[in-house]
Amino acid sequence: MNLNWEEITHVTKADPAKELPRDLGILAGTDAVMVGGSDGVTAENTLDTIRAIRGSFPDKLVFQEPHSSDHVSTDTIEAVDYLAVPAVYNGDREHFVGKHLDMFTEVGSKPDEVFGSGLPVLGDLVAAKGRDAVDRIGDKIVGEGYVVQNPESKAAAVTGAESPFSVEQVVGAALATENFYGFPLFYLEYSGTYGGPEDVAAAARYLDDAALLYGGGIESERQTREILDAGADAVVVGDCFHDDPERFRETIPS
Ligand code: 1GP
């Protein structure tokens, strides 16, 4: 992965199931866009969203954050810079490990279905093509160690994250992200509510290599600053982008 988080402090999360703001010019000051959501997302609406963003900002860094392999297609993979794939530490088995194994099982054993070459595959050829397919997406996949801290959120309902982590557990998850799982990203997800700087400050003290992202309830530059000052590499702003584009502008640090 070749991402420089020194240059990324503000990330916009665009939900493909929601309408985009009429004026996409508001994205000018954001450093990256992450396309993904928990409900009503398909590969088609994901691709439409990616294309709309690319139409206004061809060089904007764009991630797809799929919550299911159904959201991913050859076209979405080609259209984005990176696929950010969450592994939810306080979620159910499916959302921590199950979906990832399923994804690699599919890519390894049915590369044509994933990449659509149309060639018949048998025996060793399957293995060769499976490895090739993984090589093709390997450079794009960014694993995210993920903690969902708002049990009332849709993200928590979808991932089975019923219990938020204590600060000590957040620290443990940050340490495991960097020292055991080797994910390049650690994401504190307060989706829909502002969680404040406490978890961020605790996690930041233990992360040297993994980038620390905070998302949830950010509606002002003051909140953005508070989270960045606590040690996050970047804030992620979602709802406000769709619901209140004028306010969204104010979340971008000047
Ligand atoms: C959601 O972390 C993002 O996945 C952003 O949260 O929608 O509350 O801004 P909000």
Image: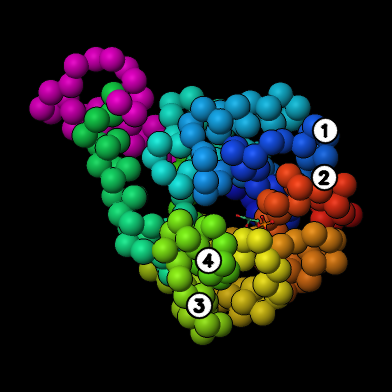
Asked whether disc 2 touches disc 3, contact meaning CB atoms under 8 Å apart, the reply is no
Q: Which residue is mark 2?
A: 245
Mark 2 or 3, nearer chain start: 3
Element carrying mark 4 = strand
Query: Amino acid type of disc 3?
Result: Phe
- Across and down, in percent, residue 171 comes to 52, 79
- Across and down, in percent, residue 234 comes to 69, 58
- Across and down, in percent, residue 146 comes to 50, 62
Q: Which residue is mark 4?
A: 148
Residue 187 is drawn in which quadrant? Answer: bottom right
Q: Which mark is residue 93?
A: none
Is 32 magenta? The answer is: no
User: In whole angstroms, how far apart are the C-alphas of marks 1 and 3?
Assistant: 38 Å
Q: Nearer the viewer, residue 153 or 62?
A: 153
Q: Residues within 10 Å of mark 1 (few under 14, many from 20)?
A: few
Query: Which residue is drawn at the image coordinates 50% and 77% (left, top)?
Result: 165
Element carrying mark 2 = helix
Query: Amino acid type of disc 4?
Result: Val
Image side of residue 248 versus residue 111, left or right? right
Query: Amino acid type of disc 2?
Result: Pro
Element carrying mark 3 = loop
Q: Which mark is residue 165?
A: 3
User: In whole angstroms, how far apart are the C-alphas of marks 2 and 3?
Assistant: 31 Å
User: In whole angstroms, how far apart are the C-alphas of marks 4 and 3?
Assistant: 8 Å
User: In whole angstroms, how far apart are the C-alphas of marks 4 and 2?
Assistant: 25 Å
Relative to 64, residue 169 above or below? below
Asked whether disc 2 touches disc 1, contact meaning CB atoms under 8 Å apart, the reply is yes
